[in-house]
Image: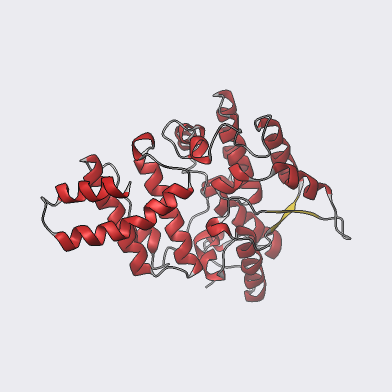
Amino acid sequence: MEFAAKNALRDYYGQGHFETVATHTQRWKPFVDWAREQGVRDLSQIDSRDLATAYAGHVQERVEAGTLAVSTAQNRLSTVNTTFAALRGDRHVKISPSQYAGPRSNVRITAPAALDTDRVQGAIAALQEAGLTRAAVTLELARAFGVRREEAVKADLDRWAREAARHDQHGNSYVNVQEGTKGGRDADRWIPVGEAQRQALANALAARPADSRNLIASHERYVDVAIARSSELNRARAILQQHGLPGYHDSRAAYACARYLQITGHPAPAVAGERLAPKDKDLEARLTISKELGHGRVDVLVSYVGSRR
């Protein structure tokens, strides 16, 4: 992927602009490293726009965690646009660096579509009818546990089931999200388990391949299930959009807004149009939800539940 990109960029710039080619080549390497971690070895076998969007999400997570400067993130995403244009010979891949890299001024002002449980259930039913069972349970897990797409697909469902069956002294159960987390984070991330979570977990256990602890069969890689052009999760996107769901990630925001209501007793600012909860309860909710979503900074929650003002 590095060699092909460097040659394509040379042709793209007419064998000139040597410093520009060198800069893009350097900025392209983090993308290649990330793609290899996802199991991608050949860009011709992958939907390039889906791959670039997934990478943009990864870059966004790093900006939110404070491990990557906004300027660096924007440069890397601009390079992805340029390099794919050079490789493909068209502008099919075009992601917005400012949308994903910030600055983090994208305060959510509307309720997530997945907050409508009837809408989500309709999409799940349509996915099941289309034979896209793993996509259906991925959506259900994302909505019930607030997990990312990769975390849902890679979750050790056997371990989750054991943890969900245990109760603390107050009769509460939790599962610990570990597999598929951004940057391989291994901090405990306990998600409370209620009826919706138990049902989602039961459906995932029923849908997983017989030889696997997660939603990936033994002969498959994550990329085959979620990123490749013909992958089940990509084929499911059209059905999600038909039901008014922009993607799997919207379910994380819906989870956050639902948890905000549970913790504060008030709808999230993105839902209500303003902050109704007292400041102390608002902060308590944001601290709790940021841990459950696997974020390192509480201020990231503005993109999930809305403004603190």
| Residue 107 visible here | no
| Residue 97 visible here | yes
Query: Residue 91's x, y, as percent?
Result: 24, 44
Question: Which of the two residues, 77 or 306, is positioned nearer the viewer here?
Answer: 77
Query: Residue 241's x, y, as percent?
Result: 46, 37
Locate residue 197: give its quadrant: top right
Relative to 216, 202 lies left or right = right
Query: Residue 38's x, y, as percent?
Result: 48, 46
Question: Which of the two residues, 165 or 26, is positioned nearer the viewer here?
Answer: 26
Question: Which of the two residues, 212 or 175, is positioned nearer the viewer here?
Answer: 212
Relative to 190, 295 lies left or right = left
Relative to 77, 289 lies left or right = right
Number of marks present in the image shown: 0
Relative to 51, 236 lies left or right = right
Question: In the rendered view, how is the structure colored?
Answer: secondary structure
Question: Which of the two residues, 285 or 63, is positioned nearer the viewer here?
Answer: 63
Query: Residue 173's x, y, as percent?
Result: 80, 53
Identify the residue at the far right of this view: 169
Residue that appears at 22% across and 41% down? 90
Residue that appears at 44% across and 65% down? 63
Q: Is residue 22 above or below residue 82?
A: below
Residue that appears at 37% across and 48% down? 52
Residue that appears at 33% across and 60% down? 76
